[in-house]
Image (cartoon, rainbow, N blue to C red):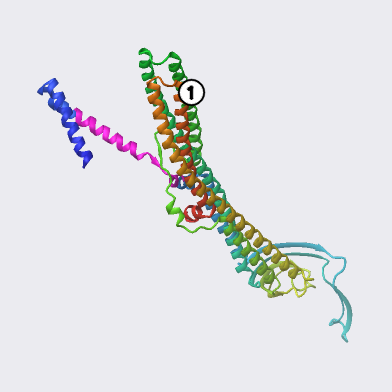
Amino acid sequence: MKSRFLNFITKNFILETLSNKLGNGYHVFIRIFVISLITFIQISGLIAQSFVVDLTQCWEKTLETHIMTTNKKLVEETEKLRSKNIENQWKPQIGIVGQATYQSDAINLNLLIPDPSTQPVSFVRRSIESPRDQYKIYVEAQQPIYLGGQKRYALQNNFISSQIEQMKNDIELRKLIEQVNNLYFQILLNRKRLELSRVVLQNLKEKEKSISAAIRNGILQESDLDAIRIEILKINQAITEQKFLNEGLYSNLSEITSLQFSDSIELKIPQISFIDSIPGKKLEEFNFESLQKQVENASQISIAKRRPTVVAFVQAGYGKPALNMLSTSFEPYYILGVSLRWTIYDWNSSRNERQQLMLQKQQIGNQLSTFKQAINLNCRMSKTRIEQLTKALQTDSAIVELRQKITQRSSNRLDKGLISAVDYINDLNAEHQARIQLETDYILWIQEKVNYSMLNGSIETLVLQKK
């Protein structure tokens, strides 16, 4: 309501002023021009206000656009392909087999065969031998009926392997988020320093004017003005360095997030309260738990391999001989059957494999415990750092307040010619450094809270595990 009232007053004031000076003939033209100009300024202001980016937007944009994010779909597609291959192993397996052999010996039968052409009937001894050159080609199909439950465990193992790959990819994405955090807070910190430097520069320029007037009145000397001008050059140099540093930080952050950053983009200071309330769990913990499940599943596969397997099969082919081993001609044939295979004793190989897997599971459990211990230690150190910065902020605020009073007194004394410009510059720089320390500690305090949320898994739960 207040802004609308001000706009109304501003438009009417401008219209009234221009109309009085130029005459009523230009009133309509002026009214259109002024309304268009004010509307353009308001729209420009709204557009400028829309260029605001916060840390969560950087996270989300990184996860949306970075090439590492595409690995999730690749892992899912790989899992589907492996699952199909596992399912196909339980479908009929069809193959063609061809064989040509020559044998050093063969089946030989010596038979007494009656000769009906003689009276009385006589018997003739005849030798019948199977062919030594044998040829065979056939199509064979095998259908697993029971394989000891290996299919279920194979599918579970494929799913767990996919989860482990996803966790590894998410850990890499978390590293990118940590890079985003560091760049984001570096920009915030450098912008604060740049802002404070500009304030100091403005103070120095105002003081340059007052010193020039004091020199003309014979209160101060030229050396005081030179000292102020030297300090202005130093501040300008520092501002230039900070601008170049910002450009590099903008470029790096844009490379990761695919967002465009510049001095016109406002970066909001993160709000940490919503992160503190979310319970977190580290990606590495999920990864270790998945590894333990994978070892347990491998143990079940080892047990399943010891169970009997039943496979139905069929063969249909053409050969010489076929099923009649004494035949000397090519003939078709087929065979239907069921085969049973059961390894009764394997010299304790399966038991040794299961013991090895149990030892591996214990090793993973020890790694998980060590990791949790390290995380707890880091979280306690981070909490201590947050408490330290909280107290430092109180001290910094008190120091800034005192330094501001000292600088104000030095400014008054300089105007009266009681101290030199060098003394005033020293006090001004001391206040400047105190303000920089206050802003630095405040941003570091926010950054440490974000780091704590990264350590305890809160941000991972909020961003990575729900993406």
Work out whether residue 378 or residue 315 is closer to the camera in this orientation and state it. 378
Q: Read off the magenta span.
A: 33-58
* Residue 322: percent from left, percent from top: 74, 70
Task: Determine which residue is flagged by label 1.
Answer: 234
* Residue 230: percent from left, percent from top: 47, 19
Q: Determine if the magenta segment contains residue 57.
A: yes
Q: Determine if the magenta segment contains residue 207.
A: no
Work out whether residue 12 or residue 204 is closer to the camera in this orientation and state it. 204
Determine the residue positioned at 60% across, 69% down. 152
Determine the residue positioned at 73% across, 74% down. 342
Q: Is residue 81 visible?
A: no
The amino acid at mark 1 is Lys
State which quadrant residue 144 falls in: bottom right
The secondary element bearing badge 1 is classed as helix
* Residue 52: percent from left, percent from top: 38, 40
* Residue 241: percent from left, percent from top: 50, 27
149 is higher (above) or lower (below) than 460: below
449 is higher (above) or lower (below) than 336: above
Q: Is residue 298 visible?
A: yes
Q: Quadrant of the N terminus?
A: top left
Determine the residue positioned at 39% across, 34% down. 264
Residue extending farthest to the front is 418
Query: Is residue 33 left or right of 194 when viewed as pictured?
Result: left
